[in-house]
């Protein structure tokens, strides 16, 4: 599986656009790490999957690190696009202005 992280302002929009472009090339997983979960009623190891009538689905869960999640997606996906997260071992695009003094 080929993975690309996109971090910075507009990361989710960039990931969505890339997913649309890659859809014809293979199965694409998108992971959004930009949303903070504040629901304290959720236990530490839960998963919620919502399935639409057209067969598309959205999942939410806890109890896995982003790397563990990517590992679990690798068997069934050709590409993984991650919004709002970066890891030193994965290719990453940083959006926005460089920090002052760089």
Image (cartoon, rainbow, N blue to C red):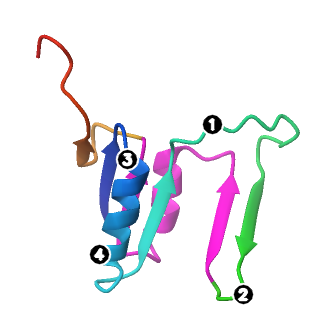
Q: Which residue is mark 4?
A: 21
Q: Secondary structure at mark 3?
A: helix
Residues at marks 4 and 1 touching, judged by CB atoms closer than 8 Å: no
Q: Quadrant of the C terminus?
A: top left
Q: Which mark is residue 53?
A: 2
Tell me which numbered mark, 1 or 2, is placed earlier along the sequence: 1
- Considering depth in this image, is 75 or 81 the residue closer to the camera? 81
- Whole-angstrom CA distance, mark 4 to mark 3, is 15 Å
Q: Is residue 6 left or right of residue 52?
A: left
Name above or below for residue 23 compared with residue 15. below
First in sequence: mark 4 vs mark 2: 4
Residue bounds of the magenta highlight = 56-84
Say which residue label 1 marks: 36
The numbered mark, 3 or 1, whose residue comes first in the sequence reads 3
Q: Quadrant of residue 44?
A: top right
Residue 57: within the magenta? Answer: yes
Cβ–Cβ under 8 Å for marks 1 and 2: no
Q: Which mark is residue 11?
A: 3
Q: Is residue 65 magenta?
A: yes
Tag 1, which secondary structure?
A: loop
Task: Please report whichever mark, 4 or 1, sits nearer to the chain's N-terminal start.
Answer: 4
Residue at image location 28% in from the left, 47% down from the top: 90
C-alpha distance separating marks 4 and 1: 27 Å
């Amino acid at each position: 599986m080929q993975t690309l992280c996109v971090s910075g302002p507009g990361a989710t929009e960039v990931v969505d656009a890339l997913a649309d472009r890659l859809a014809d090339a293979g199965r694409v997983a998108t992971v959004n790490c930009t949303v903070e979960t504040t629901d304290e009623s959720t236990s530490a190891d839960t998963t919620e999957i919502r399935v639409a009538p057209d067969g598309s689905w959205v999942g939410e869960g806890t109890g896995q690190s982003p790397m563990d999640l990517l590992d679990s997606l690798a068997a069934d996906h050709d590409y993984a696009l991650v919004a709002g997260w970066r890891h030193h071992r994965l290719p990453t695009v940083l959006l926005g202005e460089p920090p002052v003094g760089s």
